[in-house]
Image (cartoon, rainbow, N blue to C red):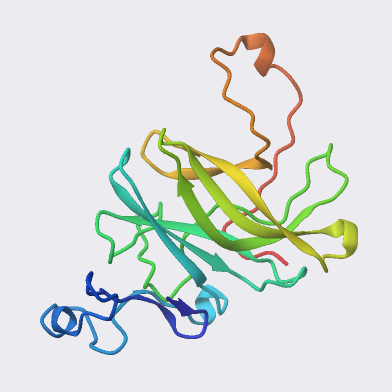
Amino acid sequence: YGSYSGGCYVIPLVEETGLPDYNYMSNTAGYDIYFGKQISATNIATEGTGEGPYIVYDKISNYYYLFLTYGGLAGNGGYNIREYRSRYPDGPFYDAQGNKATDLKNTGLKLDGNYQFSNQKSAYLSGGHSSCLIDDDGTMYQVYHTRYTADGGNGFKTVVHKMARTSNGWAVLLPYEYQGEEEASSVSKNDIVGVYDYIDSTNMTQR
């Protein structure tokens, strides 16, 4: 839990009651008995951001992934999803560059940003506040809300995007909204040849 103003935290719960486990927090280093353990921090260097935390465990990579949203949720706020990972549910969480989520600087592997491919009539804006679903077959999905230039960025809807894993275990967001498509069993060179759009969203929040 937490927000852009004070960072994000985890609190252990008593399984039988669902209440905070004060005994565990009292006897475990790194925990505050009232707040729990801080897993991310925010300040001017992180552009006043880091909210909407979501942690999911992936048994394929054996990592806990932490997703945070940077920026502002308005159409011109540049909302964008960042990724960290850890071997433990309470961290420490690191990004792909080895930065901790608690470092007071711009961190996190940026998964999305404002973008528009040449075949799209409207740009995706301010995607964020995400959740991650890992299906029984190991397929990863990212669920989040996004806005569009078509209506000036005022309205928004919830979208589902499929994710892929890199060779070193990072989850990356596929750019198109998931419509039930399945991966091709084989791909030829003729399938690959073509003209591509390249969008460099950088690791900064872009409004």
The image quarter in which residue 98 lies: bottom left
Identity of the residue drawn at 43% across and 79% down: 7
Q: Can you say whether 19 is above or below 199 in the image? A: below
Q: Quadrant of the C terminus?
A: bottom right
Q: Can you say whether 63 is above or below 19 in the image? A: above
From the viewer's perspective, is 70 left or right of 121?
left
The image quarter in which residue 47 lies: bottom right
- Horizontal and vertical percent position of residue 161: 61, 44
Q: Can you say whether 202 is above or below 62 in the image? A: below
- Horizontal and vertical percent position of residue 157: 73, 59
Q: Can you say whether 193 is above or below 57 in the image? A: above
From the viewer's perspective, is 94 left or right of 54?
left
The image quarter in which residue 73 lies: bottom right
Please tell me how many numbered marks the rendered image carries. Answer: 0
Identity of the residue drawn at 74% across and 51% down: 115
From the viewer's perspective, is 203 left or right of 83?
right
- Horizontal and vertical percent position of residue 175: 65, 42
